[in-house]
Image (tube, rainbow, N blue to C red):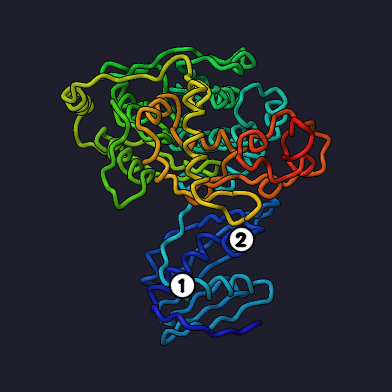
Amino acid sequence: METDCFNCDRGLTHFSKALEVLLKSPQSYDRRIRGAEMDGQYNDFCSSFKIHRKLLFKNSSLKQETFTWDELKQCAQFDEYFIAEFHDNQVKVKCENDALQMKDKLKELCQSVSLDSPTLSLQLISLEKYEVKYRQLKEKYYVALKESWCERTDPEKFIPEDLGIASYLLCLWEEERKELGIDKLQSFVDLGCGNGLLVYLLHKEGHPGTGLDVRKRKIWDLFADIDLQENTIIPSVETTYSGYDWLIGNHSDELTPWIPVMSTLTSENTRFFVLPCCPFEFYSKFKRRNHKLGMYTDYLNYVEEVCRWTGFSVERDRLRIPSTKRVCFVGRKRNSVLKWSQLTQNIKEKLVTENSTFKPRDKIEKVRNCTQVDKTVLNQIVNIIVGLLLSKNGTSKEWNGGTSVPISSLVQKIPSDLLNLLKSECGGLQTLLRNHHYIFFVSKGCVRFRIPGKDNPVKKSNKVKTKLCWFYSNHPDGCPASEKDCLWIHPDNEAK
């Protein structure tokens, strides 16, 4: 056994929080581990307890072990291989050689300035069952879906994402059937189903369901036996979806706050799952409530508030999907003391008093990437930016590389009428800069020239050059690189 001692100056509470991280997030110190499941509860290390945990490894193997906390001795123990004892702001650790990473992680946590409880995922379902279900779905569907993918979106992101969501729902619904003592598979309607992949996966696994979206996707033709409908959803206090057990909102954007509302209005037994993404209120884009929080966190709190006043004992969970927006809300239990009829009446009165109209997204997706802006307008803006960058001499005496200018300064120099034309078609100036990446380099909120031959080194390739070099034709000093070292074509086959 190896022995080590180190300080934990922030006291016993900080030490117990560090132990909680080790206990709940073993993947934080061992990359071979995917997660852990606990068999039992504990009360913040306020008293002695013993708890069993199951480690799930990425190679699908499992390991059972016991964690013990002795409050009197202030001593924690993982089986016989790891013992940590706290005394007078000192931590003494005894561990086996294969637990040294665990010891190092505890030391790091104990000596950190602040420490929060770990953010955990998949808390409403069994992690072990989820891992099994995800592997099964991936083996059954991934290859065929990727080979037949005909959308512009990246299949290596969107297929694993919907496989993860489908696996989560299938595990959640399996647990629900056990609790209710039923065998019948739950039905669902996916509101704003997009490419319809989630509907396809759930249907293939035996759950009857429908997908509704304002716009048909190309890939729908591959899902011939799936009920996908092109339908503009305009929610109101009269909108219900009877005949379905669950309402699903998967990145449903402007429909997100309406999902729990429509669940309650449909019936007192209708449940919902919603995965918020772009922030919307009932009739407009989301307006910040707490500016001390980030936009996403503030919006999640708003959605949770809506779920509660619609009568749900809502549960928040975190999915394991390749997306930054992975916090979901599950409404499967009611907490309202009001009768369902009174609850629905209150909801209707609250929404009707807002006296607003829901605006659905356009059926035809508008191109918003600057490509529809008049070329004269684009050239005017580009020339203004180039003039500002060239206003000071660069670091090179032979070629004017210009200067670096904050984007905020560019906004002030460009006429507002030109900026308004940009914003009407896209995200604005930053989209234009990205589209002209062959001229401009953006970093840390500033813009400078992307210098040919330096910022764009030529790699050995058989790729044929197809575009003219902007610097060769437009920069007052021409292109600083020879055609051999430039990614673009020099018309005269040599630099100026």
Q: Quadrant of the N terminus?
A: bottom right
- For residue 313, what is the image quadrant? top left
Please name whichever residue, 451 or 64, is drawn nearer the observer in this view of the structure: 451
Q: Amino acid at mark 1?
A: Ser
Q: CA gap, disc 2 to disc 1?
A: 29 Å
Residue bearing the label numbered 1? 112
x then y, percent, for residue 212: 46, 17
Q: Residue at x 42, y 20 (%)?
A: 244
Q: In this rendering, is residue 248 above or below 118?
A: above
x then y, percent, for residue 157: 61, 36
Please name whichever residue, 488 or 104, is drawn nearer the observer in this view of the structure: 488
Q: Residue furthest bottom?
A: 88
- For residue 101, what is the image quadrant? bottom right
SS at circle 2? strand
Q: Nearer the viewer's eye, disc 2 or disc 1? A: 1
Q: Amino acid at mark 2?
A: Gln
Q: Quadrant of the C terminus?
A: top right
Q: In this rendering, is residue 188 above or below 409?
A: above
Number of residues whose C-alpha sits closer than 10 Å to that of mark 2, classed few (under 14), some (14–19) or many (20 or more): few
Residue 137 visible in the snapshot: no
Number of residues whose C-alpha sits closer than 10 Å to that of mark 1, classed few (under 14), some (14–19) or many (20 or more): some
Residue bearing the label numbered 2? 64
